[in-house]
Image (cartoon, helix red, strand yellow):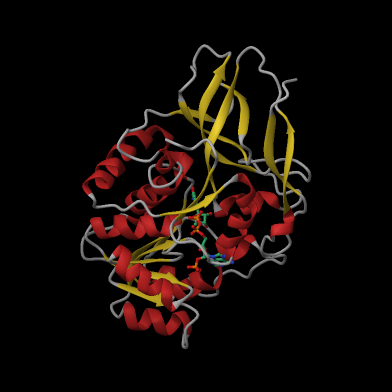
Amino acid sequence: MSDRKNKQVVLRAHPVGAPRESDFECTESPLADLEDGQMLLRNLYISLDAGFRQWMNEGAGDGYLEAMELGKPVMGLVLGEVEDSRNSDYAAGDLVMCRSRWEEYTVVDGSDYINKLEADPDVSPSCYLGILGPTGLTAYFGLRDIGKVQPGETVLISTAAGAVGSTAAQIAKIRGARVVGMTSTDEKCRWLADELGIDAAINYRADGGLEAGIAEHCPNGVDVYFDNVGGRTLETVIGHLNERARVVLSGALATYNTTEPVPGPYNMFNLITQRATMAGFMVTDYVEQYPEAMEQLTAWLKSGALKNIEDVSVGIESTGPAFCKMFAGGNRGKLVVRLEGAAR
Ligand SMILES: NC(=O)c1ccc[n+]([C@@H]2O[C@H](COP(=O)([O-])OP(=O)(O)OC[C@H]3O[C@@H](n4cnc5c(N)ncnc54)[C@H](OP(=O)(O)O)[C@@H]3O)[C@@H](O)[C@H]2O)c1
């Protein structure tokens, strides 16, 4: 066992409702020596993803991820640089992204969920967790394959100021749509208009709520709804769908913190009369198409058509608080934690 230490954030309590800072604790433990086939990653960035909240619940494991256990490091996506390798497929200096843990160093072998990155030197490596990674790809494939967005159509997006939402809003604009975003404050609405240049933004907490906001800003109805929240928001939007509208089920944030089952939309019949479709997807369905999509996203990013909007938190100790901030609507764009080693 080496005398080097690894700082990790462990799950102290299964969150009940919205996650709290006390659900997480930063601890220190010795770094294990490498065995044959393994490598040591010095993590540069940790990705904070709202969807991971679901696997923090007790017994929440499913076919996709196992439930997170108390006292164990919290699972998440990280981007790291290989510092030492006893695996012939990886050399010191390689940049990799993997499903790992909230920690400064990670020991992995090639069998873990891991991708070696051919990073473009002109973009920040953190982009590969966000706009050029699962976040951007979710927006890209959701709009392309399920939303099938056409120029001139009205695209409505929930959590438009968040990571997936702000990317979807930008891509829908590039595709020539009229884009309306939803968020929780007037200040974030202004930010959406100024920073992303979308056509209108709805504060769903304002007087009259979402119903009045959609009626005002989507007077001709909704052709594509990119849904990150589910719940009552989805129900309200269903009431405004146009004929042949498409609902892209990306996430269900409104249900991640609930302790009781959330009732489904009462108005599904509207999908029938409007001949509308609604489909869910996982970004991982598209792994084989990642390279072409990343090429397109990189081109848009480098041309300035797409902005990399990041909300950066610094240091491993900030990981738990930053995750909680996301559930209080405190982030703009992609939340990442920059770790000490991230000079590049
Ligand atoms: N299908 C896939 O493969 C896939 C992949 C990645 C992500 N996703 C989904 O994409 C969605 C967005 O994830 P993200 O990581 O980009 O997070 P995010 O949008 O950056 O952050 C979460 C945002 O959601 C809103 N929010 C927080 N708590 C909420 C609640 N209880 N009810 C409603 N809204 C709430 C807040 O925005 P406001 O202040 O604007 O309300 C907050 O800023 C999630 O549903 C996630 O599961 C899907």
Q: Furthest-bottom residue in view?
A: 207
Q: Toward the viewer: 84 or 202?
A: 84
Viewer-proximal residue among 267 and 139: 139
Which picture quadrant has residue 41?
A: top right
Classify residue 102 by image quadrant.
top right
| Residue 26 appears left or right of 176 | right
- For the N terminus, give its image quadrant: top right
Please state if 154 lies on the left or on the right of 68 as rendered.
left
- Where residue 216 sits: x, y (%)? 34, 83
For the question of whether residue 16 can be seen, the reply is yes
How many numbered discs sit on the rendered protein?
A: 0
- Position of the C terminus by quadrant: top left
Q: Horizontal placement of 267 versus 324: left or right? A: left
Judge left or right: residue 95 versus residue 253.
left
Asked if 212 appears above or below 28 in the picture, the reply is below
Residue in front for this viewpoint, 80 or 252: 80
Q: Can residue 278 be seen in this view?
A: no
Q: Residue visible at 69% across and 61% down?
A: 20
Above or below: residue 173 compared with residue 77 = below
Instruction: Determine the image quadrant of residue 200.
Output: bottom left
The spot of residue 121 in percent (x, y) is 32, 33
Residue 36, x across and y down, in percent: 64, 12
- Residue 120, horizontal then vertical, whole percent: 32, 33
